[in-house]
Image (cartoon, rainbow, N blue to C red):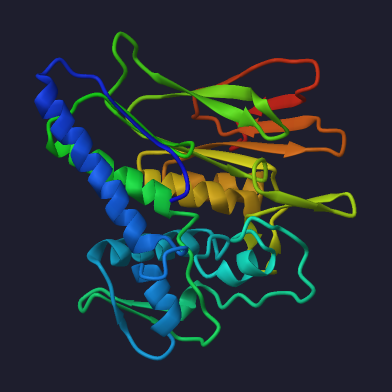
């Protein structure tokens, strides 16, 4: 998945049983990468993109499961989350590490063009230009899978981090909450604040790491499926949910929707969020939903924080 995984278990059992749990988690991460990485020509997702417009493609049950979850979030967000944005990511050079403004606007097929047959375990693309990328939901799904395996091994306290996406089991030793930092979207060495989390998941999306600046405008790697252009409603969105799959997809959608529409979507599934925007001088405006345990780090240039966005 092009990132680093950190799996931490807190338990007093013998090392061999803990090692078995960690090995199971590591194996699952590698398996999901082989199934879903669009960079792998033999992955299930790449086979969908190559053959799905001409015939149903049989895939692993985990690919079916994550595509069904993706459709649910697409419907929840009125299409702001969409796994068919791959043509846009390619046209803008984000898949090759050479981002640039394309000469021709890409065409995005839309999530309704991905037909999943759960009974037969197949996926069909109903438009010839449809292409699937699970980058906006795959890491969260992988975390949920690993967390499930660790629970099956009897683990009661664990911290899982996959490229900044976090999922937890139980609570940390000698503390009631895990404390997760939210990176400053314009200062890589700083954090805006922290969220406190029991057992759950945290995902942050934004334009802080993958972007291109053209004519003084910053364009990130998250696309608005409705326009095919990089989303600019927020510079960063953090979502806290019980499911890492849901948190991952909803944080992506929030960058497209902005704080008000995102807050409404999060309320419908019992999730919480922190939404960050920035002006041309780098000053941040931070808004948070009412139910989140968010602690803002104060600073002279970090802008204004508002709590209780829902109200």
Residue nearer the viewer, 234 or 105: 105
Residue nearer the viewer, 122 or 75: 122
Res. 51 visible in picture: yes
Residue nearer the viewer, 255 or 33: 33
Image location (x, y in percent) of residue 191 = 62, 24
Q: In the image, what residue occupies the spot 76% across and 31% down?
A: 284
Determine the image quadrant of residue 55: bottom left
Image location (x, y in percent) of residue 214 = 84, 55
Question: From the image, which quarter does the C terminus lie in?
Answer: top right
Apparent side of residue 35 relative to residue 85 in the rendered image (left or right): left
Q: In the image, what residue occupies the spot 12% across and 35% down?
A: 153
Apparent side of residue 59 relative to residue 166 in the rendered image (left or right): left
Determine the image quadrant of residue 301: top right
Q: In the image, what residue occupies the spot 51% across and 75% down?
A: 131
Residue nearer the viewer, 182 or 36: 36
Image location (x, y in percent) of residue 99 = 71, 58
> Looking at the image, which residue sits at the far top?
174
- How many badges with numbers are in the image? 0
Res. 52 visible in picture: no
The answer to whether residue 207 is above or below residue 92 is above
> Looking at the image, which residue sits at the far right?
215
The answer to whether residue 157 is above or below residue 100 is above
The answer to whether residue 47 is above or below residue 40 is below
Apparent side of residue 23 relative to residue 219 in the rendered image (left or right): left
């Amino acid at each position: 998945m092009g990132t680093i995984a950190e799996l931490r278990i807190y338990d007093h059992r013998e090392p061999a049983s803990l090692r078995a749990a960690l090995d199971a988690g590591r194996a699952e991460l590698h398996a999901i990468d082989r199934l879903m990485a669009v960079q792998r020509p033999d992955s299930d997702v790449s086979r969908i993109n190559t053959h799905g417009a001409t015939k149903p493609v049989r895939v692993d049950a985990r690919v079916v499961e994550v595509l069904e979850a993706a459709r649910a979030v697409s419907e929840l967000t009125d299409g702001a989350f969409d796994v068919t944005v791959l043509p846009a990511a390619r046209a803008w050079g984000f898949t090759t590490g050479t981002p640039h403004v394309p000469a021709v606007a890409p065409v995005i097929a839309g999530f309704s063009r991905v037909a999943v047959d759960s009974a037969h375990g197949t996926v069909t693309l109903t438009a010839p230009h449809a292409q699937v990328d699970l980058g906006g939901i795959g890491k969260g799904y992988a975390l949920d899978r690993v967390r499930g395996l660790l629970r099956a091994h009897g683990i009661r306290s664990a911290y899982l981090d996959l490229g900044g996406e976090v999922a937890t089991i139980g609570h940390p030793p000698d503390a009631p909450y895990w404390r997760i930092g939210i990176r400053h979207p314009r200062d890589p060495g700083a954090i805006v604040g922290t969220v406190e989390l029991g057992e759950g998941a945290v995902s942050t999306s934004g334009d802080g790491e993958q972007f291109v600046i053209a004519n003084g405008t910053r364009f990130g790697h998250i696309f608005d499926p409705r326009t095919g252009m990089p989303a600019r409603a927020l510079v960063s969105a953090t979502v806290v949910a019980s499911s890492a799959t849901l948190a991952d997809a909803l944080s992506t959608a929030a960058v497209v929707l902005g704080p008000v529409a995102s807050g409404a979507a999060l309320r419908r599934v019992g999730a919480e969020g922190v939404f960050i925007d920035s002006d041309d001088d780098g000053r941040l405006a931070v808004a948070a939903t009412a139910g989140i345990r968010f602690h803002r780090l104060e600073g002279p240039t970090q802008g204004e924080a508002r709590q209780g966005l829902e109200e």
